[in-house]
Image: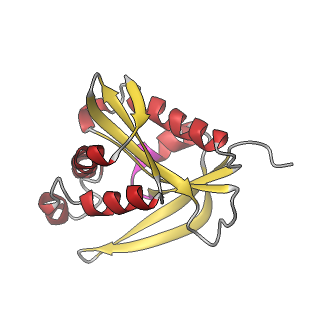
Amino acid sequence: MIIRKASQTDIPDISRIYARSWKAAYRGMVPQPYLDRLPDGYWVEAFTGWVSEGLYEALLICDGQIPVGCAAFGPSRDEKCPGPQWAEIQSLYLLPEYIGRGYGKALFGAVLSALETAGFEAAYLWVLRENERARRFYAAAGFSGNGDLYTVEIEGKLLTDDRFIRRLRDIT
């Protein structure tokens, strides 16, 4: 298990990880035709921009040299969590066959450590209301809902995300 900072050359692997993870994690939540059409390269353009513009930092977790998970995080983009003290954890995805094997916990721990080292005092993330596995994972890491909601429509289905927050260190 190796955790390292992602680079531009990792972007195709990151996009593949995200696509495979979406297809497994969101089955029964996101409309299946949408998931069936989701190509491995769907996130290449977005991640290329995020990495080149420095909007997010991304960490990869590898099994040997093979990338099996990725997390993206950076300063808050949300006016409800303003200022330099707030961080946003934009995403954390693993290949389905690595779920439940400690890879997610290790990667998420590295993300939280990086945010603390960077001086952030609190972090938030969005979690799909129907995704009980993810909600339990984040709750076990000390995150809890604050009541903020984000709704998106995919192929006619409204999906609701809950904001989960956690203090990273004491605010003086």
Q: Position of residue 118 (x, y in %)?
A: 64, 44
Drawn side of residue 133 relative to residue 163, left or right? left
Residues drawn in magenta: 128-134
Drawn side of residue 163 relative to residue 1, left or right? right
**Residue pictured at 25% horizontal, 51% vertical:** 15
Q: Quadrant of the N terminus?
A: top left
Drawn side of residue 67 relative to residue 51, left or right? left
Q: Nearer the viewer, residue 5 or 36?
A: 5
Q: Nearer the viewer, residue 72 or 129?
A: 72
Above or below, comparing residue 152 to residue 64 in the picture: below
**Residue pictured at 19% horizontal, 59% vertical:** 35
Q: Position of residue 94 (x, y in %)?
A: 32, 39
Q: How is the image coloured?
A: secondary structure
Q: Position of residue 163 (x, y in %)?
A: 55, 60
Above or below, comparing residue 25 to residue 37 in the picture: above
**Residue pictured at 60% horizontal, 44% vertical:** 115
Q: Nearer the viewer, residue 152 or 157?
A: 152
